[in-house]
Amino acid sequence: MKKAKISHNVITRLPRYLRYLADLRDAGMIRISSSELSHQMGITASQIRQDFSTFGEFGQQGYGYNIDMLTKEIGDILGISSVRSCIIIGAGNLGRALIANFPFDEYGFSLAAIFDISEETVGTEIGGKNVLHANQLESYIENNRPEVAVLTVPVKSANSTAGRLIDAGITGIWNFTNIDLKITSPNVVVENIHFSDSLLILNYYMSRSNHSPDDEV
Amino acid sequence: MKKAKISHNVITRLPRYLRYLADLRDAGMIRISSSELSHQMGITASQIRQDFSTFGEFGQQGYGYNIDMLTKEIGDILGISSVRSCIIIGAGNLGRALIANFPFDEYGFSLAAIFDISEETVGTEIGGKNVLHANQLESYIENNRPEVAVLTVPVKSANSTAGRLIDAGITGIWNFTNIDLKITSPNVVVENIHFSDSLLILNYYMSRSNHSPDDEV
DNA sequence: TAGATTGTTAATCGATTAACAATC
DNA sequence: TAGATTGTTAATCGATTAACAATC
């Protein structure tokens, strides 16, 4: 089964399309043309049509795109409709923030368990879930088969934890630690959120901007 | 003063170079060639040399790059050495996580103040700093001139808060809210951390991988 | 029907990779 | 010096934009 390779750039735009479409729907709109969406999003209508046509024919000549229908198609492409079980490793501040505020279920995930190693935290409840000790990771994964781990542990235990997760059968890691995980298994998907990289990029553009009005950012 | 436009792709790789160089230095290494770094990072040596040469001549034929020197150069390009004052708006879980764990000073920032609107939070201390009420934002910014705001407020107040920040003189926003801020001022730099986009991308690649061994990710 | 707008092909632009002379 | 490795130019590859026939 051969698949045409779809570029990473296209994939990264899909969630953004989804956000704009949700806003349009919330505003009561039914349909939108690529050119109108282009104005709102600040990208070319050509790119929008190219992006969508990568996955199918979602529009209609002379009409544009039906917002509900397009939302559903993009959601399906991104896998929102299928539910994947995930676990959070590390119930520190960041882990707790995700547990308290992040709507995993809106994005096709269900949060199944929380792990930590701190004596004070293990056994307590966070967000209605009992925090398990990380030494139970392997047995939990074998028995419950979650697919994804949210990695919010300190940097120094990041790689060892990731290794254990993968050995136990985890196939996706949402990595919040500020390093590139050393992973050899080709079947594991890793998606990074590198706070520090992002802040440095902000720093870069700030030191380049504002100095002369004709600079580009 | 005309500057050659440097591509965003190059900029996004700089923090990653910096992380690898720090690891190499920690491992006691003094110098590295583009080809050795290429193996470690999984990108081509050609790209590495191209990237660096965008900013200057940091290497030496027959020798490679001095790690300390290269680290310093890239750090300077990213603006690590200059200190920018920043404030956090929103002392919820995420704001607190950043205050507690994120080493702003390692990346050229100093955290100057924290704002919130909750009666319970305002007036308390977090990370050794007194939490101010958000109605003092304007006066604080005018008096203390922080450059950057870390936006960790709920989505519904994101745009209004951003507008106030910019009106008061903030020129950089590290945006953790899950939306694209509506900002018209051309001199404001925004860097987004969109958790939901990232998780959807993870979801996409998971639904595409593991099905057949010859698929690419 | 006439106007609007798609899906797609072709053209352009930009980014990555390859190659190699320069030189440490 | 000989070997290694850079910085840079040229070649390739891929992504974006433009154009337009198809068609709702």
Image (cartoon, coloured by chain):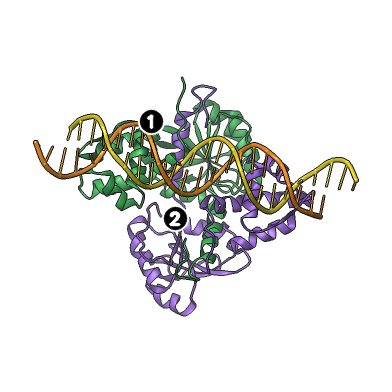
Chain colours: A green, B purple, C orange, D yellow
Q: Amino acid at mark 1?
A: Ser
Is the same chain shared between marks 1 and 2?
Answer: no
Q: With respect to residue A83, does B28 lie above or below?
A: below
Q: Residue at (58%, 39%) from the top-left corner? A: A133
Q: Quadrant of residue A190?
A: top right
Q: Chain of mark 2?
A: B
- Cα separation, mark 1 vs mark 2, equals 26 Å
Q: Amino acid at mark 2?
A: Phe
Residue found at the far bottom of this picture:
B143
| Label 2 crowd bin: few (<14), some (14–19), many (20+), radius 10 Å | many
- Residue B103 % position (x, y): 60, 60
User: Can you identify the residue that label 1 sits on?
Assistant: A82
| Label 1 crowd bin: few (<14), some (14–19), many (20+), radius 10 Å | some
Disc number for residue A148 = none
**SS category of the residue bearing label 2:** loop
Q: Residue at (42%, 47%) from the top-left corner? A: A102
User: Can you identify the residue that label 2 sits on?
Assistant: B176
* Residue A18 in sight: no
- Residue A68 % position (x, y): 25, 38
- Residue D12 % position (x, y): 56, 35
Q: Chain of mark 1?
A: A
* In this picture, residue B33 sits left or right of residue A195: right
Instruction: Look at the numbered discs 1 and 2 and tell me whether their residues touch, using CB distance below 8 Å.
Output: no
Q: Nearer the viewer, residue C2 or B181?
A: C2
Q: With respect to residue B103, does A144 lie above or below?
A: above
Q: With respect to residue A112, does B83 lie above or below?
A: below
Q: Residue at (47%, 31%) from the top-left corner? A: A5
Q: Nearer the viewer, residue D9 or A54?
A: D9
- Residue A52 % position (x, y): 34, 37
**SS category of the residue bearing label 1:** loop
